[in-house]
Image: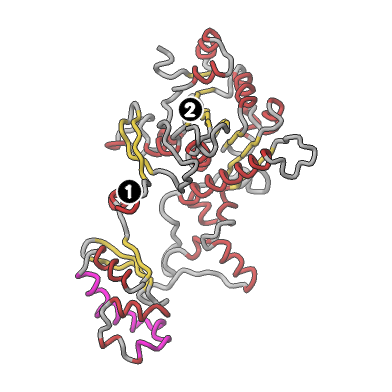
């Protein structure tokens, strides 16, 4: 991609699973040349799936295929003595290194910031870990539910008479990867423009990304509720089951699914208009702002007026009427609905790629549009060891040297490279 925003940027990728690979995916998808280094056992994402027909295959993991588009792949056993020379060559080639090992592991493998800086003093080195490289939690293990719980907002998610709930999927890990990409590009731009460097000498940067801290710094309720607590001492709480925090303000069933409606409090007249302004709902008692906190009135409104209305309509019909009356709303889509959505498809949100093993796959596309330097699917995720020989040749290794490295177990060649 000649006009990619990051065309010419070279990235050495020591990440695995989700947060780290998403960081480097963003760089690769906008033009960077990313070399993904896998261990002999492969990136763990290859074993997670989902898999077509639930048949596990390391070359068909949907998660791996999504997170590693536009990357070249090399397999190196970093524990082997001969790996140090390969790493030094790769570090000298790279502008950026991204790793996602637990603190201390990179040092043991010989790929720490200090060691790679010897090969390339200008290297930008990003570490992504659970709780950062320092502090009393640095060696703790973590997961999506742990980060969401420790980040504070799980306390307010769910119902008060039930246990707290996390958000679905791996929202926090993807967010951490996006934050790491932004931080990495900030350091890259600082180097390009000599920001803060009066001597004009390019210096390396070590970026320390804590997955937990990317949640604490998020605008998704965390910053605002943390600030509210610091300023007033108040805590956020899960809503009481059956209680009224205003209505209609929930997910409601339609004839073919569900619709999210936020038409409570000051917007209640719009919700009434959406229902056709029935006379029963235009009386003074419904106009009283205090009614929005009355659970018996909520039950009356929903059971006698709102639910009969939604259940007689499809999601599309109810949503259209809500939009016409300026009621904040949206359908609860299945993934099949999202895949077929006319707006997403007209804007090119999805793209297709032909993987040599997994076949033709429809992928989620760019997160944003840059007309002058667009996102592009140049190549699908690499097969295991697919580019090992190619990359080593680029680093100056002869075919004989590559065969010796493969025989010693230091590298693994792809199936076609191995003949």
Q: Are marks 1 and 2 in contact (CB under 8 Å)?
A: no
Res 292 quadrant in image: bottom left
Apparent side of residue 31 relative to residue 419 in the rendered image (left or right)? right
Q: Quadrant of the C terminus?
A: top left
In depth, the one of 275 and 245 nearer the eye is 275
Res 103 quadrant in image: top right
Q: Dot 1, crowdedness within 10 Å: few (<14), some or many (≥20)?
A: few
Dot 1 or dot 2, earlier in sequence: 2
Q: Secondary structure at mark 1?
A: helix
Magenta highlight on residue 130: no
Residue tagged 1: 345
Apparent side of residue 403 relative to residue 200 in the rendered image (left or right)? left
Residue tagged 2: 72
Above or below, comparing residue 279 to residue 259 in the picture: below
Looking at the rendered image, the disc whose residue lies closer to the viewer, 1 or 2, is 1
Q: Position of residue 4 (x, y in %)?
A: 50, 37
Q: Position of residue 180 (x, y in %)?
A: 57, 44
Above or below, comparing residue 190 to residue 145 in the picture: above
Residue numbers of the magenta segment: 285-312
The Cα–Cα distance between marks 1 and 2, rounded to whole angstroms, is 28 Å
């Amino acid at each position: 991609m000649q006009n990619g925003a990051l065309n010419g940027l070279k990235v050495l990728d020591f990440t695995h699973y989700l947060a780290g690979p998403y960081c480097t995916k963003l760089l690769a998808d906008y033009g960077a040349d990313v070399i993904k280094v896998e261990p002999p056992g492969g990136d763990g994402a290859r074993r997670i799936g989902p898999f077509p027909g639930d048949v596990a295959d390391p070359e068909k993991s949907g998660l791996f295929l999504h997170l590693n588009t536009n990357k070249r792949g090399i397999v190196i056993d970093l524990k082997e003595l001969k790996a140090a020379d390969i790493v030094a060559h790769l570090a000298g080639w790279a502008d950026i290194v991204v790793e996602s090992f637990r603190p201390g592991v990179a040092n043991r493998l010989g790929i720490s910031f200090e060691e790679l800086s010897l090969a390339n003093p200008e290297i930008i080195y990003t570490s992504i870990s659970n709780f950062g490289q320092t502090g009393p939690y640095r060696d703790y293990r973590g997961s999506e539910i742990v980060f969401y719980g420790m980040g504070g907002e799980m306390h307010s998610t769910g119902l008060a008479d039930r246990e707290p709930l996390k958000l679905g999927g791996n929202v926090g890990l993807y967010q951490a990867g996006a934050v790491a990409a932004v931080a990495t590009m900030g350091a890259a731009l600082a180097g390009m423009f000599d920001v803060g460097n009066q001597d004009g000498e390019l210096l390396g940067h070590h970026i320390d990304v804590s997955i937990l801290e990317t949640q604490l710094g998020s605008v998704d309720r965390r910053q605002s509720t943390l600030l509210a607590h610091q300023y007033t001492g108040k805590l956020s709480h899960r809503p009481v089951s059956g209680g009224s925090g205003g209505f209609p303000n929930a997910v409601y069933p339609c004839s073919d699914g569900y619709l999210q409606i936020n038409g409570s409090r000051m917007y209640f007249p719009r919700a009434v208009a959406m229902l056709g302004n029935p006379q029963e709902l235009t009386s003074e008692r419904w106009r009283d702002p205090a009614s929005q906190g009355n659970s018996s009135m909520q039950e009356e409104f929903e059971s006698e007026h709102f639910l009969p209305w939604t259940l007689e309509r499809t999601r599309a019909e109810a949503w259209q009427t809500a939009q016409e009356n300026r009621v904040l709303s949206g359908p609860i889509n299945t993934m099949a609905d999202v895949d077929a959505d006319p707006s997403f498809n007209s804007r090119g949100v999805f793209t297709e790629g032909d993987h040599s093993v997994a076949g033709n796959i429809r992928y989620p596309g760019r997160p944003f549009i840059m007309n002058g330097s667009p996102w592009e699917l140049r190549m699908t995720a690499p097969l295991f060891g697919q580019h090992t020989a190619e990359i080593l040749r680029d680093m100056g290794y002869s075919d004989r040297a590559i065969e010796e490295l493969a025989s010693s177990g230091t590298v693994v060649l792809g199936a076609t490279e191995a003949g």
